[in-house]
Amino acid sequence: MLPYERIMSRNNDRIKRLVKLGDKKTRDAEGLFLIEGFKLAKEYLAKVGPPEEVYVREDAVEEFSSLISSFPSFDKKITCVSTEVYDKISDEKSPQGLLFVCRFLENIHQYNPSDVSGGIMLESVRDAGNLGTIIRSAASLGVEKIFLSADCADIYNRKTLRAAMGAVFGADIIICKTLAETALDIKSSGGRVFAAMPRGDALVLGEFSFAHNDCVVIGNEGEGISESLASVCDALTIPMAKGAESLNAAAAAAIIIWEMRKL
């Protein structure tokens, strides 16, 4: 049997702290975030290492014992909680009973000019599920860098993390204050920056070739790409059936990323 502390009260101060980590402001202040479930936990351990804390529902201790005992340093970090307590800290519909408290990731960082490279750029993608799905597609298909505007959905939102399926633990994710300036830096280094948008002069995806240092912008789900960013980009459009209006942001990104990998 693994050594662990036990918390049976929903009013415990540590449990209240975990609940507060569901709020972005608290996450940013503490530099901590939460992940749930066996798959994400396994990915985190493989790509990052041991978390700060581990919480296991009392009826799931044996199920996860081999995973959480694989790191000796876990001994002092494991806490067993009652079903009622776990339900308070979980946001899953059918929770597996395993939750990690993790330190903010080093591979997610602020932009600096040395980051200039090809990749994908996301402007004001507000839906956490879309953001996570795009990151997963980009990482899976070998996109070198993922640039995000500061007003994208929170990368540490649990919905984002679930949709990304562990991709955020290894991808090079760069937060930019002004994407237009980042785009100009990429162009100055010899790359091209394409904005996925139906402009009259737009190039048609599949009718030209990408270079390794090119970057493509995916915009906000409802409003598209801002004028300031679009003005410094070449337009790019995805050929669609007559009468079709648009694609979901995550679907459009996946199609474009697939073409980008054909170097």
Image: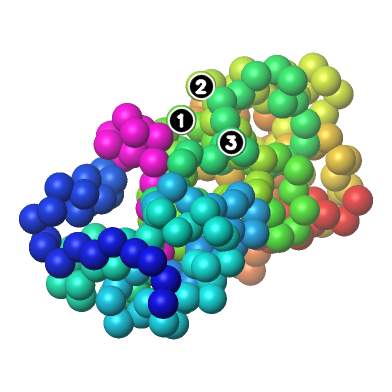
Q: Which mark, residue 239?
A: none
The local crowd at label 2, few if under 14, some if 14 to 19, many if 20 or more residues have their Cα within 10 Å, is some
Q: CA distance from mark 3 to mark 2?
A: 18 Å
Residue located 15% across and 72% down the image: 84
Percent x, y of residue 230: 59, 29
- At mark 3, the secondary structure is loop
Question: What is the crowding at mark 1: few (fewer than 14 residues within 10 Å), some, or many (at least 20)?
Answer: some
Residue stretch rendered in magenta on the structure = 24-36
Q: Which residue is mark 1?
A: 150
Disc on the earlier residue, 2 or 1: 1
Q: Earlier in the sequence, mark 3 or mark 2?
A: 3
Q: Position of residue 196 (x, y in %)?
A: 63, 44
User: Mark 3 against mark 1, which lies toward the viewer?
Assistant: 3
Q: Amino acid at mark 1?
A: Ala
Q: Which residue is mark 2?
A: 177
How far apart are labels 3 and 1 at the CA level? Answer: 17 Å
Q: Toward the viewer: 215 or 11?
A: 11
**Residue 236: x and y, percent?**
70, 44
Amino acid at circle 3: Glu
Which residue does the image show at 28% across and 46% down from the upper left? 21
For this rendering, which residue is in front, 239 or 255?
255
Looking at the picture, does residue 252 appear above or below residue 185? below
**Which residue shows up at 77% across the image and 36% down it?**
118
